[in-house]
């Protein structure tokens, strides 16, 4: 089984200290129903291990199955360019049923972003290359579906529910 490639670094969207003893990486798709179900569970686990785990998110939109996933990932990157990646990340999972372009721009406005800039960047696919880099790293790391988790660079082979993920993180700690 391939290891996480590349390892988590400065280009990643990460919460927590780079010096945390455990790093959890998720390859996710904002339109994936499994990712949507995992999202609140993951938030719960991360609250429990706060300070001990660094969490990084990488995009892996399954565009053939989820027609809005690519634009949702690009809008998250547009939000990142304005300093609000995690706020947009959370909003996209909370509103997974409404990910059309107009909704995405409305979410940008709601977060206090320059919504017209977001619209222009979305139309021009300014952030598509960044999303593509995550997808390429996922493929190189053996990702075939979402959500896909890695703990300290190793694939998490068990389910991604809160109980199982928390147990795996405790073992890693």
Image (cartoon, grey):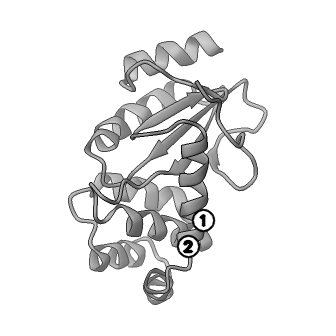
**Placement of 76 over or under 42, stated as above or below:** below
Q: Nearer the viewer, residue 74 or 5?
A: 5
Q: Position of residue 109 (x, y in %)?
A: 40, 79
Front-lying residue, 23 or 71:
71
Residue 66, image quadrant: bottom left
Instruction: Return the x and y of residue 126 as percentages of the image width and height.
Output: 56, 79
Q: Is residue 149 above or below residue 164?
A: below
The circle on residue 56 is none
Residue appearing at x 47%, y 81% in the figure: 118
Quadrant in the rendering for residue 4: top right
Q: Residue furthest top?
A: 171
Image point (71%, 43%), residue name: 6
Mark 1 is surrounded, within 10 Å at the Cα level, by few (under 14), some (14 to 19) or many (20 or more) other residues, namely some
Label 2 Cα neighbours within 10 Å, binned few <14 / some 14-19 / many ≥20: some
Residue 100 is drawn in which quadrant?
Answer: bottom left
Task: Calculate the distance from the C-alpha at mark 1 to the C-alpha at mark 2.
Answer: 5 Å
Q: How far from the left and from the top, in percent, is residue 88?
A: 45, 62
| Residue 63 rendering spot, x and y as whole percentages | 35, 60
**Is there CB contact under 8 Å for labels 1 and 2?**
yes
| Tag 1 secondary structure | helix
Q: Nearer the viewer, residue 25 or 157?
A: 157
For the residue labelled by badge 2, is the local secondary structure a helix, a strand or a loop?
Answer: loop
In the picture, which quadrant includes the C terminus? top right
Disc assigned to residue 127: 2
User: Which residue is most to the right?
Assistant: 19
The residue indicated by pointer 1 is 130
Q: Is the N terminus in the top left, top right, bottom left or bottom right quadrant?
A: top right
């Amino acid at each position: 089984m391939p290891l996480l490639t590349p390892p988590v670094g400065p280009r990643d969207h990460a919460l927590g200290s780079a010096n945390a003893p455990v790093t959890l990486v998720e390859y996710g798709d904002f339109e994936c129903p499994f990712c949507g179900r995992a999202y609140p569970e993951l938030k719960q686990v991360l609250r429990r291990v706060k300070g001990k785990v660094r969490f990084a998110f990488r995009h892996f939109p399954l565009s053939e199955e989820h027609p809005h996933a690519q634009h949702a990932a690009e809008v998250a990157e547009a939000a990142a360019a304005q300093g609000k990646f995690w706020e947009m990340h959370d909003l996209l999972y909370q509103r997974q049923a409404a990910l059309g372009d107009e909704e995405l721009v409305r979410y940008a406005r709601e977060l206090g972003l320059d919504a017209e800039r977001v619209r222009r960047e979305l139309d021009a696919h300014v952030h598509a290359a960044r999303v593509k880099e995550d997808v390429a790293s996922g493929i190189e790391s053996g990702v075939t579906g979402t959500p896909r988790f890695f703990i300290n660079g190793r694939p998490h082979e068990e389910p991604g529910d809160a109980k199982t993920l928390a147990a795996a993180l405790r073992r890693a700690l």
